[in-house]
Amino acid sequence: MTQETLRKYINGDASDEERLEVLHWAEESEDNRKELMAYRSLCNTLIFNGKLEKRASQNELGKKRRAVIFRRAVKAVGVAAAIAVGVFFGFRHHETDTPIAVETLSAPAGLITESILSDGTKICLNAGSKLEIINYKKNERRVRLYGEAYFDVTRDEMRPFIVETGKIAVRVLGTEFDVNSKGDEHSVVLVRGAVQVDSQTDEETLSYRLVPGQRFSRNPSDGSGNIAHVTTEDYTSWINGYLKFEKLPVGQVILKIQDYYGICIRHDGLPEDAYPITGKLDLRTRVDTALVNLEFLAPVNFEKISDNEYRVTMK
């Protein structure tokens, strides 16, 4: 697999043919998958460390040194190694009053990525998601999320951490939580600590506070919020490479698979609340394997139409 193809895939510039080529290559072996994740994490590091990029472009020695470190990074045996490279690159910047320019992290279809921000905050991006760094300065840490991410925020009482989705804003000092802004869903699941969720309506901003084990979900019709007690693993299991669901209609499970792998599953005629199922689905497999496993859990059959299109029928 060429570095250019990997770069285009990670940046979202790959063609459908190149995207499938990378996905098939990553699924051939665990080493390939780890190399792809290490490369993704290294790219995130280089994005944030703009000063290093500038120095390297001005200094040939810097270029050579970065190339050596890059070769080592892509041979890393996992995400932890890539994160370690991020710290080595000087990922922790000096605090200044000057906001960092908007930068972007992304997770391609079929791949969960991890990154560490300058203050040690860890972010796990779900497949097909994007995160923009808006401000990381002396009095504020602000990001904008498109999709889903799990945050483990380093506590800093002088600098609140704020996640925007366009419909809600989540404000924390230091905690662990999941934010999902895919489609019409704008929700927050709190694992540890405390968060404040501000939901924008047509007339005002409504504020809610969560305690661990609670889930906030926004009503798309009027912007109001609902808070419920939940089993957090049902909403955060994806960070460990699997989906956990309890009495979830098979149609909703199919939507999650479709979203994660970046494929199209035609399910015309399948009732929205049909066949609630309970179980776990491994996301570290090929999509074909995931669909076969789902066939064991529910009375459905999947037919492959093309490389990224399937049809589901009832048994």
Image (cartoon, rainbow, N blue to C red):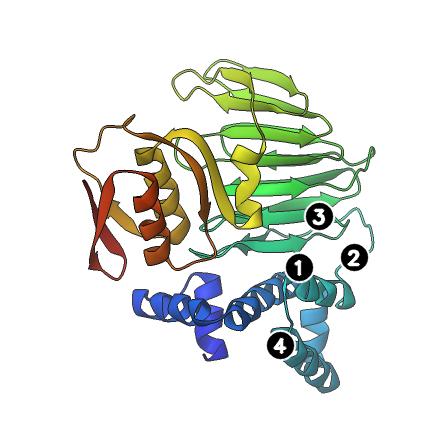
Labels 4, 1: front one: 4
Q: Which of the two discs, 4 and 1, labels the residue nearer the N terminus? A: 1
Instruction: Name the foreground residue: 115 vs 13.
Output: 115
| Residue at image point 51% right, 41% down | 148
Instruction: Name the foreground residue: 297 vs 68.
Output: 297
Q: Vertically, is 172 above or below 45?
A: above
Q: Are marks 2 and 1 in contact (CB under 8 Å)?
A: yes
Q: Vertically, is 89 above or below 147?
A: below
Q: Which of the two discs, 2 and 1, labels the residue nearer the N terminus? A: 1
Q: Is residue 225 visible?
A: yes
Question: Distance from label 2 to label 3 (Cα)?
Answer: 12 Å
Q: Amino acid at mark 2?
A: His
Please name the residue that numbered disc 1 is placed on.
48
Q: Which of the two discs, 3 and 4, labels the residue nearer the N terminus? A: 4
Q: Are marks 2 and 3 in contact (CB under 8 Å)?
A: no
Q: Quadrant of residue 298?
A: top left
Please name the residue that numbered disc 3 is placed on.
99
Q: Secondary structure at mark 2?
A: loop
Left or right: residue 305 compared with residue 232: left
Q: Amino acid at mark 4?
A: Lys
Q: Position of residue 160 (x, y in %)?
A: 74, 34
| Disc marking residue 93 | 2
**Quarter that holds the C terminus:** top left
Q: Position of residue 29 (x, y in %)?
A: 48, 71
For disc 4, the neighbor class at 10 Å (few under 14, some 14 to 19, many from 20) is: some
Q: Amino acid at mark 3?
A: Pro
Q: Vertically, is 127 above or below 147?
A: below
Question: Distance from label 2 to label 1 (Cα)?
Answer: 9 Å
Q: Amino acid at mark 1?
A: Phe
Please name the residue that numbered disc 4 is placed on.
75
| Residue at image point 59% right, 36% down | 178
Question: Distance from label 2 to label 4 (Cα)?
Answer: 26 Å
